[in-house]
Image: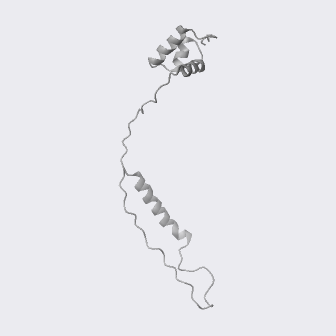
């Protein structure tokens, strides 16, 4: 365990050493370990000195490729017959409508197509 150096004042020698280590690319944690200080005290002093790192460059350089959009095939809307005018028509569910159980394969096919379209590169 590193003995922590407790200094109430920052001497010009300590400030110069911290500045030199920071400008040579050392992190605040590394500087703290070398000098026997806490990382937060080194970070605070660096902040008060106005020494900040520029944002790091991204390590990976992803190549963003725009996927061309394909025209979407739109099926015409289902035709729903208007209710007959006579009152003897059955009031229950219509046999022409698609039930949710019948819609499942269509929805799964649409979802599979959407996933395939987003996976293309």
Residue closest to the eye, 5 or 84:
5
Image spot of residue 5 (x, y percent): 61, 10
**Quadrant of the frame with the N terminus:** top right
* Residue 63 vertical placement versus 35 (above, below): below
Residue closest to the eye, 28 or 77:
28
* Residue at image location 55% in from the left, 72% down from the top: 99
Q: Quadrant of residue 75?
A: bottom left
Taking the image as drawn, is residue 6 in sight? no
* Residue 102 vertical placement versus 64 (above, below): below
Taking the image as drawn, is residue 92 in sight? yes
Residue closest to the eye, 88 or 11:
11
Image spot of residue 23 (x, y percent): 45, 18
Image spot of residue 2 (x, y percent): 59, 12
* Residue at image location 48% in from the left, 62% down from the top: 108
Residue closest to the eye, 85 or 107:
85
Image spot of residue 32 (x, y percent): 55, 16
């Amino acid at each position: 365990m590193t003995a922590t150096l407790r200094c109430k004042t920052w001497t010009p020698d300590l400030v110069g050493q911290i500045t030199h280590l920071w400008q040579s690319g050392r992190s605040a944690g590394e500087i703290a370990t070398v000098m026997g200080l806490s990382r937060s005290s080194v970070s605070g002093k660096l902040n008060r000195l106005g020494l900040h790192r520029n944002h790091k460059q991204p390590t990976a350089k992803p190549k963003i490729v725009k996927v061309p959009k394909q025209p979407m095939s739109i099926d015409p809307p289902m035709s729903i017959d208007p209710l007959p005018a006579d009152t003897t028509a059955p009031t229950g569910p219509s046999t022409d409508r698609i039930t949710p159980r019948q819609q499942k394969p269509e929805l799964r096919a649409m979802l599979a197509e959407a996933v395939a379209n987003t996976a293309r590169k």
